[in-house]
Amino acid sequence: MSLIVQKFGGTSVGTVERIQAVAHRVIQTRNAGHDVVVVVSAMGKSTDVLVDMAKQITAEPPAREMDMLLTTGEQVSIALLSMALQAEGQSAVSMTGWQAGITTEDVHTKARIVQIDPATMQDALAAGNVVIVAGFQGITEDGQITTLGRGGSDTTAVALAGALKADLCEIYTDVDGVYTADPRIVSSARKLTTISHDEMLELATLGAGVLHPRAVECAKQHGVPLVVRSSFGYEEGTRVQEEVDMEQGLIISGIAHDKNVAKITVADMPMQVDTMSKLFTTLADEHINVDVIIQSSYEADTTNVSFSVSGDEVKRTLQILLREKEHLHFGYAVAEEELAKVSIVGAGMITNPGVAAQMFRCLADAGIEIKMVSTSEIKVSCVVPLEQMENAVRSLHTSFGLDVVERAVVHSAQ
Amino acid sequence: MSLIVQKFGGTSVGTVERIQAVAHRVIQTRNAGHDVVVVVSAMGKSTDVLVDMAKQITAEPPAREMDMLLTTGEQVSIALLSMALQAEGQSAVSMTGWQAGITTEDVHTKARIVQIDPATMQDALAAGNVVIVAGFQGITEDGQITTLGRGGSDTTAVALAGALKADLCEIYTDVDGVYTADPRIVSSARKLTTISHDEMLELATLGAGVLHPRAVECAKQHGVPLVVRSSFGYEEGTRVQEEVDMEQGLIISGIAHDKNVAKITVADMPMQVDTMSKLFTTLADEHINVDVIIQSSYEADTTNVSFSVSGDEVKRTLQILLREKEHLHFGYAVAEEELAKVSIVGAGMITNPGVAAQMFRCLADAGIEIKMVSTSEIKVSCVVPLEQMENAVRSLHTSFGLDVVERAVVHSAQ
């Protein structure tokens, strides 16, 4: 008998009917001879409703009380799922984060898990129960209720799987796996049967809503076998694992894209050692998330710095720069909007030089202007005009041989 | 500096605005130099919404999971109230039942409080916080979340007041005190300034929604000074205390009524030792709540038993009797509906014989037929025709001298 941890997100438990559907799937897993621990998120938009009430009371709700408030969402889900299982004759026990033995840092709204004591869960499993754990939450050593922040429920599932030495952690979501590209853009996109942890991390944008990078990190660290699959169908999902069978020798696993990118250039900055640190510390203090950064100098004593931000942050970024103009000593700042980022991701590129060159050639052949470039060991990203993003994704998908339909069944977009 | 426990019910925290109003009242109490522990219920109808979801999943939700589900309601309230207090600059800490140190029996949906460890609350108070505790909930010794059942939040408040040796426990509700009779029926009804615990218990029907009998019992046992007052105004409420100053020598404190009563008669039962026990065990097993019971025998070997039930239970009671006719060996059963129960309550009657006689005479003078009678040490109840109930209440109110308007200000009906 093996132990499987199954995680269902907010959409999967969004209504009473869906909770009942989740119960049926859990029972099927049980009937196949497995022990099951289920991790659930809050129902659909229920967290938004709670946040909304808090915001009506105060613009900046104290973090401790936000955690007290929001953890009720998952607690409702675990109770209802346990009822649904018991209504079908499957014995089940729901557990809040603290009941499941999840200890976190003494930080509110974004605590990290420090330790998991699996004894209570193991006792309940041994007694024949399905164990249902509230995702996203834990408790500090001195008894304060905390939440794990973004990606918290995915992280709970992976961490529990690690602590329980589970044979598999299944993340159920509203898509049926990780694709070589967004099927809405590339009709010949294929679902990947396997992907490495690092590739999954780099594909975060493609996988937005599929699997949170934190959970992937956690799975990588603890060697937890992970599968992403659909809660609405029974197709095989995508397995995230360290040893990838190289996907039939493909260098690139997938093409990711982000259609909401802007480029900001800060010109005529003094060429000093702390120029870059002053600029990006100022932005970080204001929680501006900067992605690609390029520094270039045309003259000996001044430098231009360009960086990309989310399209939603352009206005605020420019306001901050203007406010700090004296402090930062730059000449002028300009923004270029309506851009997109296209990335190729694949562990294969480590051992294959010339991948970046192939990408640039492919984009040039397609007549696509490259605005900015950034690279990591297993990723090359190009910022391009938004209007050419889809063309870029399709061209790259073909260029890197991802269009080939082989063993895997091609799935249409959700 | 004294310590006051204040309890606010679901209506008092029904909306964000009302939660903010509660915060203001708490701050006023603080500013008057008192330490404050606040106990709150779930917001308005939020418990009903949760119960409704559970019922959609299963007709009989498991008790443990109902507790897991329903305790989230109070947890939402404590978090929001703490935010509202902090938004006004008052430091505050919210606590679930288990965080506040409330241990209960190992029973779900109707657990009794076994013990309260006030240390965590006392530490938080000493640090200058208002402490906000989720009513209606606790935890078993082995970490299961429980609820206290009906009247649970009132009971939490009184029990905390006892454990903290509070100087006062204030129950805020949507009426401004306990009246000598329902002001909607008796226009000259007076609000009582004081009432004894026992009288308050007997007036439960008059006080429906005002103060739960369990909380009164608990206050009596632990000698907790208790006040019932309105959360919408600043009038003095009614003080529930052991030593009552006899309310200007009145024998009767109030007139209670229940307008939804039916009388059921089971005729021609065999005159055997276990006849009564068999009949009422059968009804108890089916959760039929029986109030007044009268047994009479006209012949040597058979007996007739009459009892009163809630008007809503008549049909089900007759069905059960019919089903068990063989087992119970009775001749026939009939129901008389459209009845009401009128009660006079007062500790003074213990030392004043003839109170029951005065009640019967008063009703007879008013031409009101008495269908059934039951008495306790401090209460006499008569079942009368529903159409004569209001007449009965008014006549008794006058007959027992309650109409007199004296020191106390007369309040109009809510």
Image: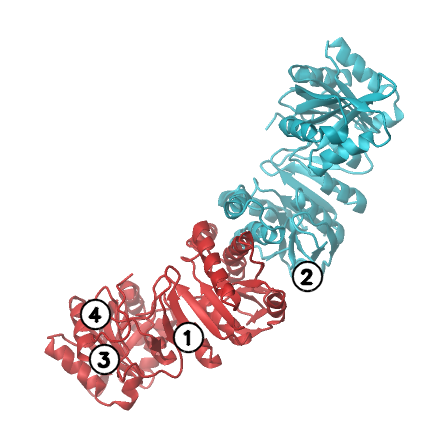
Chain colours: A cyan, B red
**Residue B373: image tag:** 3
Task: Pick the quarter of the image with the C terminus of chain A.
Answer: top right
Front residue (pair B346, A359): B346
Label 3 crowding class (10 Å Cα cut-off): few <14, some 14-19, many 20+? some
The mark closer to the camera, 1 or 4, is 4
Which residue matches tag 4?
B188
Residue A111 pos. (x, y %): 70, 50
- The tag on residue A120 is 2
- Compute the Cα span from label 1 to label 3: 25 Å
Please name the residue that numbered disc 1 is placed on: B216
Residue type at mark 4 is: Ser
Kind of element beneath mark 3? strand
Circle 1 packing at 10 Å, graded few (<14), some (14-19), many (20+), is: many
- What chain does badge 4 belong to? B
Residue B306 in which image quadrant: bottom left
Asked if labels 1 and 3 share a chain, the reply is yes
Q: Amino acid at mark 1?
A: Val
Q: Amino acid at mark 3?
A: Val
